Amino acid sequence: MKANSILVELSEQLPKTAQTFKAIQFPESYEDIIVQAKTDLFCFRKIDGVMEDGRLTKTVLQQSGYEEWLKQIEHEEDEGENCILEVIGALNLIIELAEELAED
């Protein structure tokens, strides 16, 4: 499967270490991208929450490649919140486009 140029552009808003970024840059299926992006999105929306399986959402994000990025934004109060909002926006767009592409 060839990487979709619009998804690649959207992924540039994510850290290069993020699993969603990697799933887009080296795609196997749109379904994989959707699943990973939805997991990331859920975790960012409830950044101090808990997953259904009991894992902390912040831990899931760290394991999904956001560890260094999260450390950097922790020290930037207002800017950190803006960074998280930007990633949430990018993930929403990635999910929407990947779902449309998966239907084709």
Image (cartoon, rainbow, N blue to C red):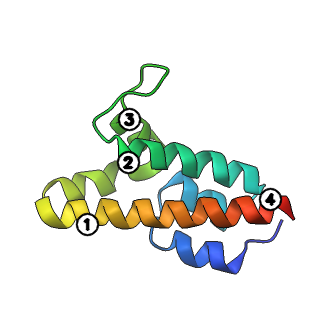
Q: Which amino acid does label 2 sit on?
A: Phe
For marks 4 and 3, give the one nearer the viewer: 4
Which residue is identified by label 4?
102
Q: Nearer the viewer, residue 97 or 10?
A: 97
Instruction: Give the crowd class for mark 2: few <14, some 14-19, many >=20 residues within 10 Å.
Output: many
- Residue at disc 2, secondary structure: helix
Residue 50: horizontal and vertical position, in percent? 37, 27
Distance between the Cα atoms at labels 1 and 4? Answer: 30 Å
Label 4, label 2: how far apart the Cα atoms are: 24 Å
Task: Kindly report the distance in space between the C-alpha atoms of the residues bearing marks 1 and 2.
Answer: 12 Å
Residue drawn at x 78%, y 65% is: 101
Mark 4, secondary structure of its residue: helix
Reading the chain from its start, which is encountered first: label 3 or label 1? 3
Q: Which mark is residue 82?
A: 1
Residue type highlighted by circle 1: Asn
The residue depicted at 33 percent of the width and 62 percent of the height is 85
Amino acid on which the number 3 mark rests in the picture: Thr
Mark 3–mark 2 distance (CA, rounded to whole Å): 8 Å
Cβ–Cβ under 8 Å for marks 3 and 2: yes
Disc 4 residue type (three-letter)? Ala
Q: Which mark is residue 57?
A: 3
> Label 3's element?
helix
Mark 3 burial class by Cα count in 10 Å: few <14, some 14-19, many 20+: many
Of mark 4 and mark 2, the one earlier in the sequence is 2
Mark 4, residues whose alpha carbon is within 10 Å: few (<14), some, or many (≥20)?
few
Image location (x, y in percent) of residue 64: 48, 45
Sequence-wise, the earlier of marks 1 and 4 is 1
* Residue 14: x %, y % from top left: 45, 65
| Residue 66 in view here | yes
